[in-house]
Image: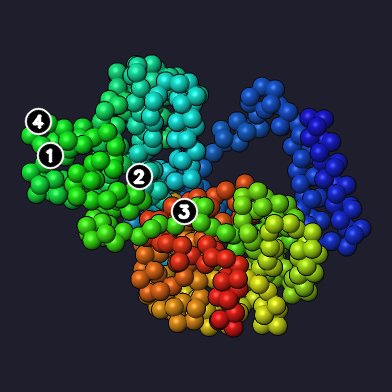
Amino acid sequence: MSKNRALAGMFETIADVLEIQGEVVFKVRAYRKTARILDDLAEKIDEYLKTGKMKRYDEALASIPPGLLEMLGIPGMGPKTVAQLYQELQIDTLEKLVAAAESGKLDGLKGMGKKKIENILHGVELMAAAGERMLLGEAMPIARAIVDALQEAKLVSRIEPAGSLRRWKETVGDIDILATGKNSQKIIDAFTAGAWVGEVIASGETKASIRTESGFQVDLRVVEAGSFGSALQYFTGSKDHNVKLRDIAKSKKLKLNEYGVFRGEKSVARKTEEEVYKKLGLPFIPPPLREDRGEIEAAKEKKLPKLIERSDLRGDLHVHSTWSDGSATMEEVAERATQLGYEYIAIADHTNSLRVFGGLSEKEMRDKMKEVEQLRKKAKGIELLCGVEVDIKSDGTLDYSDKVLKDLDVVTASIHSGFKGDEKKMTHRILSAMDNPYVHIIGHPTGRLLNQRPPYALDMDAVFEKAAETGTAMEINAHYQRLDLNDVHCRRAKELGVKIAICTDAHHLPDLDLMEYGIGVAQRGWLETADVINAWPLSKLRSFAAAKR
């Protein structure tokens, strides 16, 4: 508790210093608020750390029906709405909420229009979907932790994630892992006894299923070393991809299954995936492409794309700093980007409309430009670019004047409010932004948050056509909660000649490592280095930006 109080005092002192220095008001307030919260809650935190319980928390939970908290999980449903429904209609479960919405009982309640009722029902659907599928960025660390632990225990000779996780699908139903080793029972025992286990669902000699503490199911299969390749191909999927492969096998009078490729009873390929595909007359098809979207036909014609890799990227063009709502200074961002091997990094902070997130006025942006110039003189091995994430307002105009935008290296324009407009209005906003000669990239173009918020209504073909016409790139936002654009849109953008920027939208230094999820989307969208502007040398990137102006 004394440490929390000490921290509160330190945050209060920081606020005092910032105020003396004339720092922007929102930063001073943020530190004072943090100090107040730390001080007020110190005793409760200390109680929890000592006992593992908090009396006030237990009292709060006991004071309301548990279903009300579940209702708070509906995207867009706040405490006021939950309280209103409970007090006026005694709705205290999701089931009662859905029944009331479908029967018309919500009609006429204050603030409860037709659109809001539709959003509530859609939100319940999203909750159900979220309960069934986990985000890629939640699943991948769990799979890696298990794989690393079993490798470190020296129990496995080969081990790989499989299923939709290996195909880098944006959400996965469960985590599939495939392993082989000398003693399958020891592998199973180590898996079911691991720190990741919340509950053992089933356990046998060669297969086990567990549920993690967070509720995710993980399945482990131990297969024979000689058939690891065919098993990995089979359990990676997708189902539709595998059906096509079996059809090819049949046409060659072969049989294909998880144990290998067979001619009669004799195995002719099974040790590696490459062997399996080669026996079917195909080159190796990378897992992210295995969705039966033309990859088999392209493989037959030797026209598979040379997919972009993480190592191909030369920089990140959308990173936030302490100038707005990021937690790292520009110098810290540059240092981390250098460690990642980047040639350039663009600091793209928010603009005036997003003052709640530290958005900068035009004058503050000018001050930031000066600091970038100073840091450029100090930075070694990396070019620091002065960028911005300028807000696209409801009428399609931008939050900054062209006088400021023209002096920035990289301009990303994004929508951050008014998501419920109709398709015509939302499309107009994006198209108008792309007409601006100083806008280089459209950030998180559809505005979705996976399992939380659906994309807003857009005519995507009209957006891509305008992007191609104006030379505007579209962003793959690599944060695993967004992955926006999605893979299907990336493929369509490529077909229309639209360039892509894969960016992390990082607000904290660890977020810079989320780039791999954007790469996964890009690979599923068949993208190559020529399609991605931040896979280009800085000189070519600058030429791309200048061409629009």
Looking at the image, is 187 positioned above or below residue 425? above
Relative to 227, residue 467 above or below:
below
Classed neighbour count for the residue bearing mark 1: other residues with Cα under 10 Å, few (<14), some (14–19), many (≥20): many
- Mark 2 against mark 4, which lies toward the viewer? 4
Q: What is the C-alpha distance between the residues marked 4 and 3?
A: 39 Å
Residue at coordinates 61% horizontally, 56% vertically from top-left? 342
Marks 1/4: CA–CA distance: 9 Å
State the SS at label 4.
Answer: loop
Question: Is residue 120 found left or right of 264 in the rendered image?
Answer: right
Q: Amino acid at mark 2?
A: Ser
Residue 477 relative to residue 324: left or right: left
Q: What residue is rendered at 80% in x and 44% in y?
A: 35
Mark 2 or mark 3, which has the lower sequence index? Answer: 2
Mark 4 Cα within 10 Å, few/some/many (few <14, many 20+)?
Answer: few
Q: Which mark is residue 265?
A: 4
Looking at the rendered structure, which numbered label has been put on residue 309? Answer: 3
Toward which corner of the image does residue 505 lie, by quadrant?
Answer: bottom right
Report how far apart the C-alphas of labels 2 and 3 lie in the structure: 19 Å
- Nearer to us in this view, 403 or 24: 403
| Residue at point 12%, 31% (across, down) | 266
Q: Earlier in the sequence, mark 2 or mark 4?
A: 2
Task: Identify residue for label 1.
Answer: 255
Which of the two discs, 1 and 4, labels the residue nearer the N terminus?
1
Q: Which of 68/227 is in front?
A: 227
Q: Where residue 69 appears, x then y in whole percent?
A: 51, 42
